[in-house]
Image: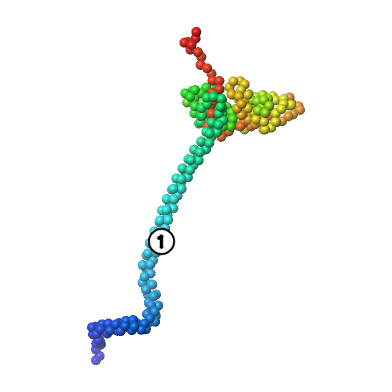
Amino acid sequence: MQTLFLQGPSVTLRALILVIASIALMTVDHRWSQMEIVRNTLSHLLYPLQYTIDLPIRLYYWADITLSTHQALLDENRRLEELYLQNRIRLQKMDILERENLRLRELLSATPKSGEKVLIAEIINVDIDPYRQLVIINKGSNDDVYISQPVIDASGIMGQTVHVNANSSTVMLITDASHALPVQIDRNGLRANAFGTGKINYLDIPYIAQNADIRVGDTLITSGLGGHFPANYPVAVVSHIERSPDEAFARIKAEPLAQLDRSREVVLVWHNPPQPPPSEDDQP
């Protein structure tokens, strides 16, 4: 009867044989380099196994780097968006301040050089009545504003005050249907009256003779008559002339020079302000 387990060399003998074989192989490879071909062949054969064993570690590091980079890009993108928004807000504020500064410079350059007192005011409201051309400014009797005081902008005459409160005033624009303004043609001094039409874009210049020397493009300026408006302020430009042989007067329209529907800042001009009645102490 055969035995179940065959007896082989002992473990110590096997280890000794392997050590001797390893030393022999290393000696042969070191001296004569005869094992290079074998090493290369074994490397090629074992590379798929090494790659398979190393693959999970490679995937782990790749996923970690990819996710970290993606999150970093998201955080950087969010930070740049916030910075961009902040810069846009600052830029808008600077742009608004620059435009306001430009408007104020234009207003100051439009004021007279004759020593008349002036005051810059801001339009704070517009009358919603479609049949009136009224705006409200933030200056009133506390600032010595008076009724019928001239109001101008950087381009020309805007109107005059009609109501004065302590801290605000109502200004009637020159295009209001109930407003009239004495004017003259800057080119030749021809006098006329500019009447509001209730429309923001033109004035009516009635009672001009058919043969009067007036042309499209003529500038109308204040004549100073009537005492409310100082002389030589620009008012409008003649935009339309219609002469009919059947009528005694020409039909003339003029476009206001002031930015009536766009101006934000205006200038109040002290021209012939009403004098307070003399007190009893001043009477003889």
Q: How many dots with numbers?
A: 1
Left or right: where 85 falls relative to 179? left
Q: Position of residue 225 (x, y in %)?
A: 62, 21
Q: Position of residue 8 (x, y in %)?
A: 25, 87
Q: Which residue is mark 1?
A: 66
Q: Is residue 158 above or below residue 279?
A: below
Taking the image as drawn, is residue 18 in sight?
no
Q: Identify which residue is drawn at 41% across, 61% down.
A: 66
Q: Identify which residue is drawn at 52% across, 26% down.
A: 118
Q: Is residue 80 above or below residue 278?
A: below
Name the element at disc 1.
helix
Pick the residue in front: 120 or 11: 120
Specify the amino acid type for callout 1. Answer: Thr
Classify residue 14 by image quadrant: bottom left
Q: Identify which residue is drawn at 51% across, 14% down.
A: 277
Taking the image as drawn, is residue 44 in sight?
yes
Pick the residue in front: 61 or 221: 221
Q: Position of residue 91 (x, y in %)?
A: 48, 43
Number of other residues with Cα within 10 Å of mark 1, as a class: few under 14, some 14 to 19, many 20 or more: few
Q: Position of residue 67 (x, y in %)?
A: 40, 59
Left or right: where 237 falls relative to 89? right
Q: Identify which residue is drawn at 63% across, 30% down.
A: 236
